[in-house]
Amino acid sequence: MSDQIDAEPDPLKGFQLAKPAYAEACRRGIPFSMLPAEYGGGGLSNVDFVIAAEEIQAVDPGFGTTVLVNGLGLMPVWYYGTEEQKKRFIGSATADESGEFLVGYAASEPPGTPGGTANFDAPAIDGAGMHVTARLDGDEYVINGRKYWPCNVGGWDNKGANLNLVVVRTGSESGGTAGLSAIMVERGTPGITYRSISTSAQRSAPNCEIVFEDARVPASNLIEGTKGNGDLVINRNFAWSGPVAGIGAVAVARSAYEDALRWAKTYTGGGPKPIIHYQYPGYVLGDVATKIEAARYFCWKSAHYLDQHGYHGEMLGAMCKVHCTEMLFDCVYKCMQVVGVNSVDKKQRFDRYLREAALLPLYDAGNFGMQRRRVHGVMVDEGFNPRAFMDDEPVDFTKDMEGIDTIPGPKTDEPTIPSPQTAEPFAVR
């Protein structure tokens, strides 16, 4: 089924092929296993969740992303919501018995001047980065703007996920990180359209463009503690997902390694014995195995750190995601070198591994522009302890650490350059 989804040219039809597997996952409690038991979730620790995520993503990393995004959409409700919001939103997800309940997380937007999602925390004017606005009108927020790349948000039919956590600009006069908040948008809200994006990898994870046109959402759907702190929601979310994306890289590398090892143990190339008995294949695959093991333990360490420190690990989560996903590409290509030209034959699946390896460093907050920026921002702080992770000490992440290497926008008396109408959106989720 995974290969059938990958080969389906229509991204929505491909995602719909995963519906039976998702229903079975729901029956086993997987999609909301990361949420606290007191609100009906599975109550898994981050370490437990990462261990389970490796097994899922070794089969299909896109399916693992679909599960992960349920957490990205609901974890901020647990962190920052009122008790009523936790029961209403988390409880509705965990109590659902349809086997179809999906939660989306919408932060990413198309590029602009000076915006674009990766520049959301630039210390700039004119609403740098996030341009989707939510204007309070009585007891409702009126949302306008466009998101590009968010996962799960279209649901199974591109009419909306059951719940979508959307990062919006509630302070329309503010730029950069100021005035950002997170609001929950429910399925069936008028004024919203969804369009599938056809991606080159993780095709079982549905990405969409969303257009908001005077969409009205109850003011009570604004997650209480996120008002003016949407920037911290983004950074904390991607800290949590860092080791999950990292273990996804481990899972894909593991699959490529096991396929290459199986090949090397049976393929002779016309020689007297399988090529595993020769130095080059043996040494190369040994190096690959070593990198996979090291990356796996980094993911476990990062997950454990999150468990120990209230789900805060903004710097370590970023380090883990960068290291593991960039390890992946090297491992996959080395496996292809061992298999040789036969790795180009699609029946060997290495083309799939290569596409997944190219994607992982770019998604879930790109390694350049978002992940490394977070590491840089913490590291430059005067109070940073370079041995904190070694000693399992907390490392705070504050607004002062954002925007460390972004380019400020123009001053109010400087002209701006219109955005090209044909510009392609950033490949960032």
Image: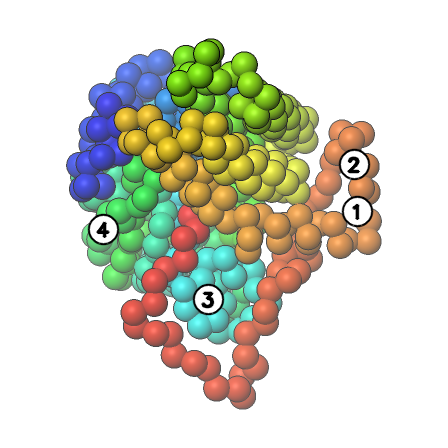
Cβ atoms at labels 3 and 1 below 8 Å apart: no
* Amino acid type indicated by mark 4: Arg
> Alpha carbon of mark 1 to alpha carbon of mark 2: how far?
8 Å
* Amino acid type indicated by mark 2: Ala
> Alpha carbon of mark 4 to alpha carbon of mark 2: how far?
44 Å
Count of residue discs:
4
> Alpha carbon of mark 3 to alpha carbon of mark 2: how far?
34 Å
Q: Residues within 10 Å of mark 1 (few under 14, many from 20)?
A: few
Q: Quadrant of the N terminus?
A: top left
- Is 227 in front, or is 357? 357
Q: How far across and down, in percent of the image, does residue 108 sit?
A: 41, 53
Q: Residues within 10 Å of mark 3 (few under 14, many from 20)?
A: many
Q: On the picture, is 372 further left or further right than 10? A: right
Cβ atoms at labels 3 and 4 below 8 Å apart: no
> Alpha carbon of mark 3 to alpha carbon of mark 1: how far?
29 Å
Q: Residues within 10 Å of mark 4 (few under 14, many from 20)?
A: some
Residue shown at the point (82%, 53%) measured from the top left: 382
Label 3: which residue?
115
Q: Earlier in the sequence, mark 1 or mark 4?
A: 4
**As displayed, is residue 13 above or below residue 286?**
below
Mark carried by residue 384: 1
Q: On the picture, is 78 further left or further right than 148? A: right
Q: Earlier in the sequence, mark 3 or mark 4?
A: 3
Q: Quadrant of residue 90?
A: top left
Cβ atoms at labels 4 and 2 below 8 Å apart: no
Q: How far across and down, in percent of the image, does residue 378 sit?
A: 71, 49
Residue shown at the point (18%, 42%) measured from the top left: 10
* Amino acid type indicated by mark 1: Phe
Q: Earlier in the sequence, mark 3 or mark 2?
A: 3
- Is 283 in front, or is 5? 283
